[in-house]
Structures are given as C-alpha cells and as structure tokens.
Image (cartoon, rainbow, N blue to C red):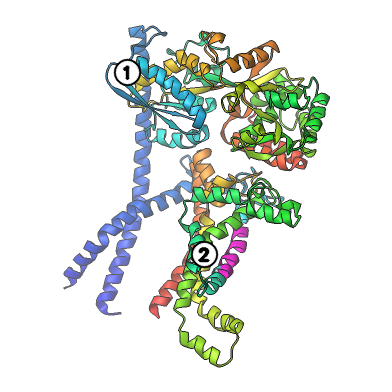
C-alpha cells in the first residue's frame, strides 16, 4: 500500500474509534436524559390527573349523560373481533354514529394478546394507536396502575352492573376500564338435529357423559366425540377450567386464581387424573384444530360436541339447531366481560370517553340484540332485548343457578397465561405428562 | 494535497459514519449495556437468570432433557443447524446440477424460489398446512406407509413440532442455495468437464471429483449464510407453533421476543440478544475472513 493509502486507512480507523467512543458517550448521556424525562413526564401526568379530577368535581357532571362533542371528530376503536363478530360490533358503532353524526369511527381488529404485547411499548413512548381499545382486564388494571389510562371512576356507576364485574379493571381504588357485554362458556354445544337423529340426550352424571361419548364415537362419520379448538391456546384452557369447576368446585377456580390452591395440590390433580385425562387417553377429544376452522367440521357431523363460548351461536348456520349442556355436576360457569379503556395519549379523550360510556350502557343493549352471542353486564338492559337464541341460553344458565366465575388464565394473565396455554396443549397430545405439566404450572402460579 | 485528502475522507466517510453511529453503533452499545444492568447496578444477573430459566417456553437449556424436545432454545437452534445446513447444501447442489439441462427447469426453480420471496407469516401458514393431518402432504405420505407417529399433525406434538419447522425451513431456504449453486456451476470452466469426458470419466466421477471441489467457495457461503439465517429465525416459529407445545420448538429469537414484548423484561431480552449476536458473529467472522482473503487474491 502507498503512504497515502496507509494514512487514509489510519485516519479511517481513527474516525471509527472516535465514532465508537461517541456512541458510548451518547448511550450513557441519552439514557440519563431519558430517565429524567420519564420522571418529569410521570410528575406531569400526576398533575394532569389531579386537574381532571378537580375539574370533574367542580363541574359536577351527571354520570348518566355525557354531552356529545360538537365538532367533527374521528375515533379509532380497536377490538379483538373480525369476520362475523366484527359485523355485530359494527352494529353497535352504527347505532352510536346515528345519534352522533359529527363522530366518525374507524374500527380496527387487534387480538387481546397483541394489544398486551405491543401497547406497553407505545404507551411508554407516549403514543396510542387508538382512542378506545379493548383488552384483557388484567392488562387494563396494570396499565391503569402505571398511569397510562384515563380514570373512568366518575364515568362507570358500579351499582348498575352485574356484581363484581367491574372489580377486574380496578386498581388503586379507581376504575380504569369499562365493561362491555359478557360472554359465557357454558358447556358442550351440540346440534339438536344430530342428537335427535342418533337418539342421544343430555347426560345427568359423569358416567352418563362417558356413555354419551362412547355412543357418539360409534356413529359412522364421527372422527372424535368432542372437537378441540386450537389457536393460541384458550379453547383448551376453557375445557380444563370447566372440569376444574365441575369436579373441584367453583371455590377451587377462585383459589387457583388467587394462588391459595396450588396446581400440585392433590385435589387439583384428582380433577385431571380422575376426570379429564382418562377421556384424553381414550381419544374422546380430537387433536387441537384451529377453533374457527373446526366449526364447519363439527356442523357437518365429523364431531359430536364442541366446547365453546356463547358467541358460537352467531357463528353457525342455524342458531336454533344448537343447544348445550354443562358437565352434569357443575355448579358454576366461566363468564367474563370484554373491557375497553381510553389511553391518556388519545388525541380525542372527551369524545373517546363519551363513546366508552355508550359502550358500557346503551351499546350493550344493541350488541346483545344482534347474533353476537353475548349478554349485557349493564343490568338496565331487559332480557327481552336479547337476541332470541341467547334468551334461552341465558335462561338455562340462570335456571340451574350456576355461579358465574372469572376466567382462570385471563385473571392471572401475564407470562403465566402463555405457559398455561402451552402446557395444556402439551397435555392434550401427551396425557402422560400430567405431573410435569402441573409442576410447571405451579412454579409460575402467583403466590397468595 | 494532504488537506485535500483529509477533507475528502471526512466528506465521504462522515455521513455514513454518522448514520452508522445513530442506527447501528448506538443500539448495539446500548443493548450490551442494558443487558448488564439491573436497575442502576451493573451485574451478570440477567445472563444468569436467562441461562438458568426453567419455564419451558423460555428455557435456553433444559436441565433434564428427554429423548425428544423440549431441550431448550439454544439446543433447538443447534439441532436446526445440524439438520438444515447439510440438507440445504446437498439438495441445493443436486437440484442446481440436475435442473441445468432439464425441460421445465425454470418452472421448478420458480417453485423452489417461492419460499424465499413469500413473507415469513405466509410461509409459516403454508408450513402449518404442509404438516396438517387432514391436508398436509407429509402426514398423508406417512399414513400410506402406515407410520402412526408421523401420520398426525406434526406441529402439535412435541416429538415432531421442531422437525416440522426444520423441514419447512429447508424448503424456504432452498431457493437461495439453488441460485448460488446455479451461478457457481456456470462459472466452472467447461474445458475441465470436457477434458474429464475425453479421459473417460463417468457422470458420477465428474460430479464428485470436479464439480464438488470447484463449488467449494459457494458451499462455504451457503453454509455460513444458512447458519446465520437459522440463528435469526423467528417468524415461522411464531406463526406455526408459538414455541410449543410445552416449549418443544422454541428458538433464541422467539425467546428474545417473549422477554421484550410479552414479559416486558427488557434487560433479559438484551441479554438473549447479546448471546444471539455472539453466536451469529462466529459464522459472520469466517464469512468476512473468506470474502477479504478472496479480495486479496
């Protein structure tokens, strides 16, 4: 290499080293600056929160009626529904827009698991992709506690809702989410025509349930008596919780959520080993199949029963041809509401709060009246307003006097929820792994 | 003259170096520092926790591994390299050689190359269907041969989930390998092959004694690039199995994502990313060494 080339190379190397050192300095400096800015932002948010509270107290706004915004406003609403379910939610939006012509609402689909994965980073940056967002209750409570959400304590009147339904979105004594309609996971769905054609009837005990499964297994064309839904994993966890409630009791469900009862407790293992695992080992459950693609297969008679939530009533060809039964000994059913929140970083907080108030009240009546398969959590919606097939579902549950219990993994949430789903998928294809599954679940279970 | 050279240096190197500092050097240095931080303390705790994690969906190494997965993400990545790299090399070379003078080869090559151009999410869905018990080609073939273990949906069983992903990934990366080998074959002087034919060499001898040695530089590139690609794999694992069932198909990149986006444990995510970067540096170093020595020659 010539002398000039050598010098150029040395200069380039020197510049690179200087750049590296500058980079290191920039990292340390910017991190310190970012810590200071976060602290300042935190203080500002607290002050803003106090000002909002004072304003509301001074104005003494009635909690029932919010004055709709006058200027043209565009709201982005993010929810977990797509396909038919999105259509039913659109009916709610359309009803609102009719009475609020200055408001334009754009609906976007995002699953709750994606909301929980992506929003914290965005909130940390002070931005929000939507004005009204649906998410898991544990996630809403967590974000509210961290100061990212609008306080809805003066917007939601707890006494007007199903008892306890608002508790899931409370933190530090404040309400951070608004309850929307409620879903129930009442039991095993079947086609009435299938049962009639094959002379089948709802079982009244566990042994009758097993006999029913045997009969269905013997029907030509049936692959497995019970279809197992798949996806991220919640359809399998719904089945497991149903067994826990039926054969461990409603209190076991609550104790597992609080951590008072551990998954390795002999009483919990008994539910799995005596009731669920034998059915898995005998092949009564199908392999996990994506939960929406299995619906037409079940409808076509490849499977006899399908454990799913009440929203399935809006996803079948003829909702009058379906019925359900819970596990015979069950005294409880998992139910939960969908919850929405308003991020503090929304550009249209007032309009968003007005819409969320509607969702939490009259909007529920609209949603429950279409084939959404949901029931209202707002007690002021009359049963007669419910979509007809859901009226009979709701009556069947209330007649049996079944307690409505929170969803286990939705209540615990976080990383444990993913572990729960993953381990149950393993149990489904490898029932012999029960001990290791229970041990893994117990290890991550919250302590009481 | 000297000042003129220095000014040119600053003018031409300055802007790209500035961009490098902002978008490459700062994030790298920041991530490394983050991986050693716990609160305001410098510590190795993040690395310790990440390496000894026992939750199956996040374990890097499983302490009591069985004969089938889960073995831990680090081992899964190694197994992936051990299986995928030779398959990509051998299949790529054979296909490139066989399709040179085959009628309809452009169509076949196009199908092979499809895996490279499809988005990762779409590829993942196709892989899921490939191994589905009802419609997947692999389960159906094994059902014909009466192999029950392989006639079910591969992606939902811990014994087969990882291998379904590996086989699917071979299809995805084969296009790259075939393309490189095709170019490599075109660069072999025809005089060598003609001379061999004149000397009475068989097709097999020509392939093993001339073609393969001549393709050595290409093979090295394919091996190194495949190793780097396998180490970074995330999208198809996320879409097809999510790392399950029971953590039987986790990979390093997925675990890094779980710490970052799911648990929001940024320090641990940084620790995993540093481990991943160090592993990727090994083939990258050899690749750069090969490129630079090639330039010198």
Label 1 belongs to which residue? A101
Q: Name the side, left or right, on which B3 lies relative to A122.
A: left
**Marks 2 and 1, how far apart at CA:** 57 Å
Q: Name the side, left or right, on which A43 lies relative to B189.
A: left
Q: Quadrant of residue A328?
A: top right
**Depth check, front residue: A365 or A127:** A365
Q: Secondary structure at mark 2?
A: helix
The residue shown at (53%, 80%) is: B211
In the image, residue A185 lies at what x, y percent?
64, 24
The residue shown at (17%, 69%) is: B4
In the image, residue A286 lies at what x, y percent?
71, 38
Q: Secondary structure at mark 1?
A: loop
- Is residue A192 visible to us here? yes
Quadrant for the N terminus of chain A, please: bottom left
Q: Is residue B199 above or below residue A100?
A: below
Label 2 belongs to which residue? B108
Quadrant for the C terminus of chain A, please: top right
**Depth check, front residue: A75 or B4:** A75
Identify the mark at residue B81; answer none if there is no mark: none
**Mark in the foreground, 2 or 1:** 2
In the image, residue A333 lies at what x, y percent?
67, 20
Host chain of mark 2: B
Please say whether residue A402 is one of the residues in the magenta stretch. Answer: no
Q: Which residues are magenta?
A: B78-91
């Amino acid at each position: 290499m010539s002398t000039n080339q050598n010098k150029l190379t040395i200069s380039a190397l020197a510049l690179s080293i200087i750049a590296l050192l500058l980079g290191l300095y920039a990292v340390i400096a910017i991190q310190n600056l970012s810590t200071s800015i976060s602290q300042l932002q935190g203080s500002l948010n607290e002050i803003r929160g106090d000002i909002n509270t004072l304003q509301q107290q001074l104005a003494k706004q009635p909690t029932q009626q919010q004055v709709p915004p006058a200027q043209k406003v565009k709201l982005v609403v993010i929810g977990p529904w797509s396909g038919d379910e999105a259509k039913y939610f659109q009916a709610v939006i359309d009803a609102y827009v009719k009475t609020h012509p200055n408001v334009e609402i754009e609906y976007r689909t995002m699953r709750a698991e994606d909301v929980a994965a992506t929003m914290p980073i965005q909130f940390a940056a002070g931005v929000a992709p939507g004005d009204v967002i649906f998410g898991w209750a544990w996630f809403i409570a967590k974000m509210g506690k961290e100061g990212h959400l609008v306080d809805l304590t003066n917007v939601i009147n707890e006494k007007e809702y199903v008892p306890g339904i608002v508790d899931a979105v409370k933190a530090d004594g404040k309400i951070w989410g608004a309850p929307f309609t409620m879903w129930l996971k009442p039991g095993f769905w079947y086609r009435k025509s299938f049962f009639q054609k094959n002379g089948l009837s709802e079982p009244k005990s566990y042994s009758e349930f097993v006999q029913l499964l045997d009969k269905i297994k013997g029907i030509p064309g049936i692959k497995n008596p019970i279809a197992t839904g798949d996806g991220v994993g919640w359809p399998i966890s719904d089945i497991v919780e149903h067994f826990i409630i039926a054969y461990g009791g409603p209190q076991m469900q609550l104790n597992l959520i609080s951590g008072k009862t551990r998954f390795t407790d002999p009483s919990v293992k008994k539910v799995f080993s005596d009731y669920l695992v034998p059915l898995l080992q005998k092949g009564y459950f199908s392999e996990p199949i994506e939960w929406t693609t299995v619906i037409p297969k079940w409808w076509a008679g490849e499977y006899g029963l399908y454990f799913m939530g009440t929203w399935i009533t809006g996803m079948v060809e003829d909702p009058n041809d379906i019925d359900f039964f819970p596990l015979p000994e069950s005294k409880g059913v998992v139910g939960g509401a969908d919850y929405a929140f308003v991020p503090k970083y929304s550009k249209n907080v007032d309009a968003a709060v007005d819409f969320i108030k509607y969702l939490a009240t009259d909007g529920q009546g609209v949603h429950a009246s279409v084939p959404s398969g949901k029931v209202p959590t707002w007690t002021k919606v009359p049963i007669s307003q419910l979509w007809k097939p859901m009226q009979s579902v709701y009556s069947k549950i209330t007649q049996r006097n079944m307690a409505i219990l929170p969803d286990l993994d939705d209540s615990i949430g976080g990383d444990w929820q993913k572990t729960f789903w993953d381990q149950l998928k393993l149990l489904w294809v490898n029932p012999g792994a029960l001990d290791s599954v229970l041990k893994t679940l117990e290890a991550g279970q919250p302590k009481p | 003259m000297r000042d003129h050279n220095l000014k040119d240096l600053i003018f031409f190197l300055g802007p790209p170096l500035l961009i490098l500092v902002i978008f490459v050097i700062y994030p790298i240095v920041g991530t490394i520092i983050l991986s050693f931080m716990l609160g305001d303390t410098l510590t190795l705790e993040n690395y310790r926790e990440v390496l000894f994690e026992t939750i199956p969906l996040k374990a890097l190494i499983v302490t009591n591994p069985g004969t089938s997965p889960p073995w831990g993400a680090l081992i899964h990545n190694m197994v992936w390299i051990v299986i995928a790299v030779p398959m990509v090399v051998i299949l790529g070379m054979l296909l490139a050689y066989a399709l040179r003078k085959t009628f309809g080869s452009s169509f076949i090559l196009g199908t092979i190359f499809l895996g490279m151009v499809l988005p990762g999410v779409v590829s993942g869905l196709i892989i899921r269907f490939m191994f589905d018990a009802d419609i997947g080609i692999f389960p159906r073939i094994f059902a014909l041969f009466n192999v029950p273990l392989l006639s079910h949906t591969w992606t939902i069983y811990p014994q087969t989930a990882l291998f379904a992903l590996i086989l699917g990934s071979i299809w995805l990366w084969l296009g790259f390998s075939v393309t490189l080998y095709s170019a490599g074959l075109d660069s072999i002087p025809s005089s060598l092959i003609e001379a061999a034919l004149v000397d009475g060499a068989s097709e097999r001898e020509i392939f093993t004694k001339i073609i393969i040695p001549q393709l050595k530089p290409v093979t090295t590139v394919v091996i190194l690039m495949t190793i780097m690609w396998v180490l970074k794999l995330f999208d198809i694992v996320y879409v097809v199995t999510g790392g399950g069932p029971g953590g039987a198909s986790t990979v390093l990149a997925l675990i890094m994502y779980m710490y970052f986006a799911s648990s929001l444990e940024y320090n641990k995510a940084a620790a995993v990313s540093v481990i991943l970067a160090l592993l990727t540096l090994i083939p990258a170093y050899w690749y750069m060494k090969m490129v630079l020595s090639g330039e010198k020659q």
